[in-house]
Image (cartoon, helix red, strand yellow):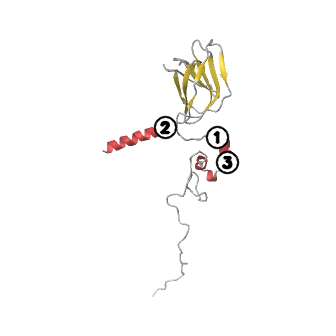
Amino acid sequence: MQSRLLLVTLLTGLLLVRSQTPDGQITGRISDTAGARIPKAAVTAVNVATGVKTATVTNEEGNYRLRNLIPGVYRLEAEAPGFKRFVRQPIEVRVGDILTIDVGLELGAVTESITVTAEAPLLEAASSSLGKVVDNRRIMDLPVPGGSVFYLMQMTPGVISTASPTNLYNANEMGPPPAWPSRARAAVPPSSTSTATPS
């Protein structure tokens, strides 16, 4: 019985750790202008700041998934024989994002390319998780009581603090510590200065 409980606890912990990865993903489908899926198309995400490339090829249904992308701005490139090369930038990948970008390739030589630069911001529709990236400017500019990062977490949609804003928190605490000392002091009688006299 204890071994089953231990196994369930370990599996639950692994699922929680897996769901809180510090990277992002880009997924999508490659097709031609008529909507036919293109298998074995080369898809690459290039980190604009570092130049690191993450590459994959589409499966038989034309789907691709680029995993383990560190947060940053990327350029997405897709190409297949007989089609023009596709480039889309900038694409911002944040912590935990799973962005879906479907690509339509046009017939033509691979030496020709289509570059997409100004599109609407991407919405993460692949998962229902809530999250927010607090950039360095906000961390430096916003007043954070006691230097507590938990106040910054309250900027995330759907996060509600149940603690009173007037509590006296220590740094990185969201409420009183477990053994909160009482503010009322017990009345201590003044010490008497009696002297013992030997008898």
Q: Nearer the viewer, mark 3 or mark 2?
A: 2
**Label 3 to label 2, Cα distance in Å?**
29 Å
Could you give the CA–CA distance between mark 3 and mark 1, rounded to whole angstroms? 11 Å
Q: Which-is-in-front pick, marks 1 and 2?
A: 2
Mark before the other along the chain sequence, 3 or 2:
2
Q: What residue do we see at 53% from left, 64% from top?
A: 181
Q: Residue furthest front?
A: 34
Count of all numbered marks drawn on residues in the image: 3
Mark 1, residue position: 135
With 125 as the anchor, is 10 left or right in this view? left
Q: How far across and down, in percent of the image, does residue 189 sit? A: 53, 78
What is the x, y in percent for residue 188? 53, 75
Relative to 193, residue 10 above or below: above
Q: Residue at left 66%, top 44%?
A: 138
**Amino acid type of disc 1?**
Asp
- Given the image, on which type of amino acid does mark 3 rest? Leu
The residue that disc 2 covers is: 19
| Residue at the extreme left | 1
Which residue is located at x 57 percent, y 36 percent? Answer: 95
Q: Earlier in the sequence, mark 1 or mark 2?
A: 2
Quick one: SS at disc 2?
Answer: helix
Q: Position of residue 129 (x, y in %)?
A: 53, 40
